[in-house]
Image (cartoon, grey):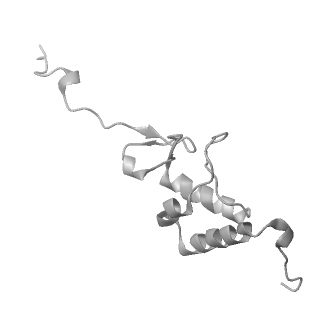
Amino acid sequence: MESMPLFPRRCQAKEAKKETCVICFDDIIDLALMFVVGESGHRFCLTCVKQHIEVQLLDQKIPNFPQHLCKSHELSFVRCEKLLTAKLSFMWRQRIRKDSIPFEQRFYCPRI
């Protein structure tokens, strides 16, 4: 006859809470590896956020929140800076500078 455990399962140590990245759908146990979007509370793994930022910058856009139809605004450069490579950081700063000039005041050198 098999003996019963001394402590019921609910009394044993709690399992770590998992969060799911809404982009790649990976379950992540370590919440330090998640990027939380301000007011909306959406959570993404750091790898997906980095890739999302890179794609947005390569598409000549200032990165926005990766959650489809999220009412939040653009991602903050300051908040994301630690995730970025030097190249991505430079691209984002350039994009901010370019977008700060009104469209009708922009001009481009035709020789470049």
Quarter of the image for residue 112 reads bottom right
Viewport quadrant of the N terminus:
top left
Q: Residue 97: x, y in percent?
A: 68, 72
Q: How many marks?
A: 0
Q: Nearer the viewer, residue 50 or 97?
A: 97
- Judge whether 79 appears above or below 15 on screen: below
Q: Residue furthest top?
A: 1
Q: Residue at x 66, y 67 (%)?
A: 96
- Judge whether 73 appears above or below 86 on screen: above
Whether residue 73 sits left or right of residue 4 in the image: it is right
Q: Residue 35: x, y in percent?
A: 47, 50
Q: Residue at x 63, y 41 (%)?
A: 70
Q: Residue 39: x, y in percent?
A: 52, 42
Quarter of the image for residue 17 reads top left
Q: Residue 109: x, y in percent?
A: 85, 83
Q: Residue furthest right?
A: 110
Whether residue 20 sits left or right of residue 96 in the image: it is left
Q: Nearer the viewer, residue 7 or 79?
A: 79
Quarter of the image for residue 23 reads top right
Q: Residue at x 54, y 75 (%)?
A: 86
Whether residue 4 sits left or right of residue 33 in the image: it is left
